[in-house]
Each structure stands twice: as C-alpha cells, then as structure tokens.
Amino acid sequence: MGGRYGAIFIVLAALALVPAVATVAEAPFYIGLFARIMVFAIAALSLDLILGYGGLVSFGHAAYFGIGAYAVGILSYYGVTDGIAHFATAFFAAAIAALFIGFVSLRTSGVYFIMITLAFGQMVYFVGIGLNEYGGDDGLNIARHSNFGAALDLDRPIVLYYFTYALLLLFLLLGNRIVRSRFGMLLQGVKSNERRMIALGFPTFRYKLAAFVMAGAVCGIAGALFANLTLFVSPSIMHWTRSGEIMMMVILGGLGSQVGPVFGAAAYLILESVLSRLTEHWQAVLGPLLILVVLFSKTGLYGLFAVSRRRSG
Amino acid sequence: MIYAIEQVLNGVQFGVMLFLMAAGLTLIFGIMNLINLAHGSLYMIGAYVAAGVFSATGSFFLGLAAALTAAVLVGIAIEIIVFRTLYERDHLDQVLATFGLILFFNEMVRILWGSTALYMPVPSFLSGRVELLPGIPYPAYRVAIIAVGLAIALLLYLVIARTRIGMLIRAGASNRVMLGALGTNVTLLYTLVFALGSALAALAGVMAGPIFTVESGMGESVLILAFVVIVIGGIGSIRGAFIAALLVGVVDATGRAFLRPFLTIFMGGSAAAKFGPALASMLIYILMAAVLFVRPQGLFPPRGL
C-alpha cells in the first residue's frame, strides 16, 4: 500500500509544479496540455469506477463528457455565465442522462451492455448534430469562462489550471472513499460474482445504477472543465472514438487502481502529442500500439510502478 | 403517398445493407464469442477498393470482385494476427484491440487514398429508374440493392440450415469444445466464418459506395447501427438480425422523412425545425430501448442459430 500512496504523492506534486516549470521554461503550451490531461484524468477516473471496480464495460462515456460541455455552452448561449450554475447543470444533466441510459442498459450485461452503451453514446452524438439552434455540426463558441467571481478568475490560465487540479484532487479523494466504503465493496463483489451477490440478497441492479450515475455525473464535470479549457463545444467531443480514448486511458493506467487514470490520461495525451508532431498519420502508429498494449499487458502502466500490488480482476 | 412508399423503400434498402453487416457480426459473435468493432473497417475497405478499382478500370464488377477479395484477405490476416489471441480474452480486451484496429485502418485509408471523400458513381446499367408499382418510379440501383440483399439473406439461410458447413457453423455456436473433440478443425472453421463475415461487410460497403460518401470512418456509423440491429434481433440470431435490420431501416428512413412534418402539427414549424432532426436521429435508439425494456435478450433470443 505504501507504493500506492507514494505514486499518488509524486504525481500530484509533479502536476502542481507544472505551471511554475512551464512559466520558467517559457513554454505555456504545457500548462494547456497538462490541464487537458487532468480533465481527461477526471473523465477516466469516473469511468474507472464502473469499469475497473464494477466490471461494467460502458462504451458511451463520452456522452456524459459532451453533455457536461454542452451544459456550459448552452447556458452561455443564453447569457448565463455563473460558474456554479454551469457546473451544477453539467453535473445534474449528465447524472440524469446516465440514469436513463443506465436504467435501460443495466438490464442487460456482457456484450449487450457494451453495444447498448455504445449505441446510446452515438444517439447523444447525433442529437448534438441535430441541435441546429446550438450550432449543430459546427459547434458553439463560448464567449466567456464560467464566472466564479473575481477571486477565482478562470480567464487566467493558471487559475483554470489549479481549479482543474483542485477538482481532480477532490475526485481522487472521493473515489478513494467510495472504493473503500461498503458501497465500493459491493460494487467489487458484483464484478467478481454478481450471481453470488444476488444470492446473498443484495439488489445489485440498484448499486450498479448508482455507480453508473455517479460516474456519469463526474464525467459531466470533466466535460464542463473541457468546455472552459477550449471555450468551444461541438458534437465531435462526444464522438464514439472519444469513449474509446477514455477507456484506453483507464486501461493504460491499469483497471481499478484509483490513481491509474491520471497516469493513463497523461500517457495517452503525451503520446498523442508526440506522435502527432512526428507524423500527420499518428493514428496509424497509435492503433497498433494500443493493440500491443492489450495483447501483452494486463496491469497497465500503473502496474509497472506498483508490482507488489494485489492484481485486480 | 408516392413519397411515403419511396421512403419505406429507402428504409428497406438501408435495412438490407444493415442486415449484411449485422449477419457477419452476429455470426462471428455467435460462434467465436467475439465482439468485433473492426467489422466496420471491412465495410470501409470494401467501399474504398471498389471505388478505386471502378474508377480505374470502369468496370463495376471488377471493382466488386477486387473489394470482396481485398476484404476477405484483410479479414483473414487480422483473424490470424490479432483475433486468435483474443478469442480467449474477455470482451473488454476485444473491444480495445479492435478499437486499435479501427484507428489503424481509418488512418491507412487516409494514407492510401487521401483524406478527401471518394466519389463512386452508380454503375451505368443501373442508373435509370424502374416502376416497381405502376406510377412509382424508383432508382434501379436501390432496387438492385434490395434484390441482392434479399438474395443473400436467402442464400445465407440455405447455407446455414441445409449444408454441411452450415451444420458445422451451428454446431460451433452451440458447443465448440465438443465440435473440436469430434475432429472438426475449429481453427479453420473460425477463419472461414470470419472470411464470410468480411465478404458480407465488404459487399455492404460496395453497395453503399454510390449512396453514401466513401470516406475514412464511414464504417463506424453503420457498425453502431448494426449493433442496434443485433441487440434488437437477439445476438447470434440471423433471423432476428434480418427482421430487426428491416425494422431499423424503415423506422430510421420514415422517421427522418415524416417526424418533422408530424411535429409541426403539434408544436409549430420553428420548434419542429429545431427539435425534429435531433429527435429523428434518436428514434431507432428509442426503439432499441423500448425493445430491451420488454425483452432484454432481444426479439429472437438465439437457440443455436
């Protein structure tokens, strides 16, 4: 267990130092890159809750990301700039969508579940394209960052960076509490043997749905952060490949490892950033790399750092 | 009325194309227990090769033959290189590895043919219109798609229900360990089924070429609809896939055509214009949710095939 906390500490300390180092090195690009990494780390850790701990292979997670981003975009479109309104709407809109999608999808399992979540993700994507009022396919520009008052001025990149950092920290701590709670234990029980959990008298559907909604809501927050980062939302941010990317980050970081998603998001986005500078056709390299990771690694990047950890799943 | 019949026909035409995709997917899933996201890539490869060869040689059939050959070869190659390792893995690994394949193929297509969409004309012998019913002219090419799709569905049924190879496929679906123990080369059977699925996907891609744009990533929107089809039809069931494909095709086409005028009656033109397109694209997913709500295993839960 010591290794786990050590890793978390190192990662968080490094992330906290990024703006200072980037400013000294006069490379503000890295503040943006690492802010993105943290946003996707939040999205990935929300997926890890249901995928890594609950064993639910949800392939539509980008939908909640998009809903969160669109919550900020659409409210701004109507002139609402209040940050609390933005993030609360993102959170609850994503939670409600996850409630509906989860309610239908969780009636099934296995491949059905994968296909259905993928299909619902695609549905939300097409709804985004159909929303002509909000830019349709072309997307929607956001005039200003979410307004949290003068003390927390998100217009300043550094403030936005540490705001994202604080939220990542919050969700890491929260995730840690959830995973170690009775609820988290139940969820892991469902993953390893759902039939036994049912036989023991647990209403597993309810627990799975609760976890599914939590994951969706947190991913909505990640989407709202992303909208603030780019000041632009379009359906492409919830394209199904985004769901695949978020899932890749979870796998790269190691399933069910709490801090793993941070590693995974960093690895994926840095790899993407490096490869795309080398060649325009970076996806032709990334694809086979991902296949190799899947075929030859079971514990992900985090597993490389914490070998002694009990192997999960 | 003519417009309505035309829309239903469009739906049937789209439905048989979805069936070709869904049949391959559902066979591969039913027998190898493999979820293959890269099935859409084979559809895309079919469309690209056909468009390329067709424009180079001027012969549609040469394009078709090249497309089927290319897709079957690529299908066999990825089956041997990637999928053989994946059969024993869980579905998550299969999803991720085939996601990697999609990224690869989408990018390879861009490298080989450029990132602009290819244009594929309707072959000249099918460019006219035919009167299916008196007074209702309908594009001959789409009629041909419907005819080919139905013929393939019938052929598939006959092969699976009446031939020796079909018997082996059914046996593989119900108990592959036993089939192997009885002396059948299951590895070879898997490769064969995979090649068959690849050919069906490529055929759908070739037929889609002149109707949709031939572009990188074209396979995935069809793939996801094919998923909807097999979820509605019941995974592993060819019959379910056929009925669900037609259902999804018709609901989608008529929804896009009629939902907006229908909404206009209730909520006025501007609101209908605002929400009509978004709602129309949700329709088949709502259908899927409704079917699942009543029958979580789909309309035809498979007993064998």
Image (cartoon, coloured by chain):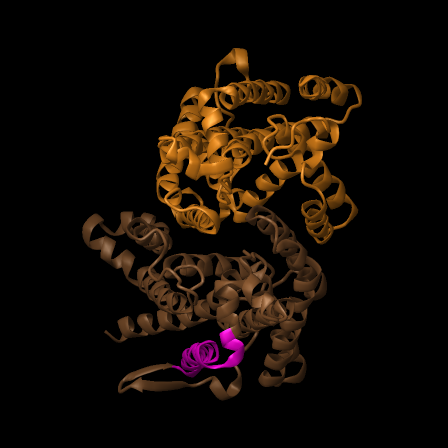
Chain colours: A orange, B brown
Instruction: Describe residue A274's horizontal placement relative to residue B276 as left or right.
Output: right
Q: Which residue is at the front of the view, A101 or B25?
A: B25
Give residue A191's position: percent from left, percent from top. 50, 36
**Number of labelled discs?**
0
Give residue B260's position: percent from left, percent from top. 29, 56
Q: Which residue is at the front of the view, A188 or B248?
A: A188
At x 31%, y 64%, the residue is B254
**Is B142 in the magenta?**
yes
Give residue A83's position: percent from left, percent from top. 45, 21
Q: Residue furthest top?
A: A151
**Is A106 in the magenta?**
no
At x 39%, y 59%, the residue is B234
Give residue A55's position: percent from left, percent from top. 51, 38
Image vertical order of residue B143 relative to residue B33, above or below: below
Q: Is there any visible trace of residue A77 in the rendered image?
A: no
Image vertical order of residue B170 relative to residue A7, above or below: below
Image vertical order of residue B189 relative to residue A59, above or below: below
Q: Magenta part of the protein: which range?
A: B139-167
Quarter of the picture containing the N terminus of chain B is bottom left
Instruction: Describe residue B93's horizontal placement relative to residue B148 as left or right.
Output: right
Q: Residue furthest left?
A: B266
Quarter of the picture containing the C terminus of chain B is bottom left
Q: Is there any visible trace of residue B225 in the rendered image?
A: yes
In the picture, residue A297 is in which quadrant? Answer: top right
Q: Main secondary structure of the magenta part?
A: helix
